[in-house]
Amino acid sequence: MKIKVLIVDDEKEFVDTLSARLEIRGFSVTAVYSGKAAIEMIEKLKFDVIILDVLMPEMDGIETLKLIKEKSPLIPVIMLTGEATVDNAIKGMKLGAFDFLIKPTDTERLAEKINQANAYKSEHEERIRQAEIENILRTKGW
């Protein structure tokens, strides 16, 4: 099954190019161009990994990350940043971002990060499922 990726960045040309490059590598990609649109999208659809630009007008990446983590705490978020906003990317890591990459980023490196983030999410979800099963077995006295 394809990894479902949401790209959030206000630079339409960049997003469209990156989406095409990731789709060629076998990812299922949805793109939005604002933090607000990203929040609306994660309320409608499930994603495995989110790629989020730090510097956007209206709602920046840090504010968007906070809302994403409130709504869907297990979705790994990879922050994209220009050189000037590395401090914000570090703030993002403290708020729960999986990782950050500096723009422009190599598509192969980004694809590798997406795969790592998805594997991390899958492992985390499996640990939660196992804990729930153990809890059920314990409460049933089995």
Image (cartoon, helix red, strand yellow):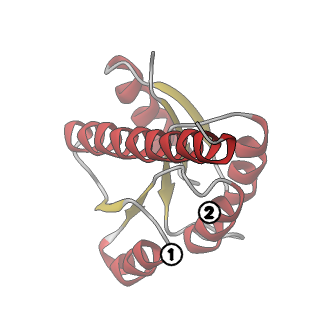
Reply above or below: 120 against 36: above
Q: Which residue is mark 1?
A: 95
Residue 15 picture location, percent across and down: 49, 41
- The image quadrant of residue 71 is bottom right
User: Which numbered tag is attached to residue 62?
Assistant: none
**Residue 15 higher or lower than 91, as above or below:** above
- Find the distance from the CA under tag 2 to the CA under tag 1: 8 Å
Q: Quadrant of residue 47?
A: top right
What residue is shown at x 43% (from left), y 79% (from top)? Answer: 94
For the residues labelled 2 and 1, say whether their Cβ atoms are less than 8 Å apart. yes
Which kind of residue does numbered mark 1 sit on? Answer: Leu
Asked whether, in this view, residue 59 is left or right of residue 142, the answer is right
- Residue 141 point in image, percent of width and height: 63, 42
Label 2 packing within 10 angstroms: few (<14), some (14-19), many (20+): some
Which type of secondary structure does the marked residue at label 1 adopt?
Answer: loop
Q: Which residue is mark 2?
A: 69
Residue located 31% across and 58% down the image:
103
Residue in front for this viewpoint, 104 or 67:
67
Quick check: 120 above or below 80?
above
Q: Is residue 17 left or right of residue 34?
A: left
Task: Look at label 2 and name its amino acid.
Answer: Lys
Q: Earlier in the sequence, mark 2 or mark 1?
A: 2
The reply, left or right, for residue 98 in relation to residue 29 is left
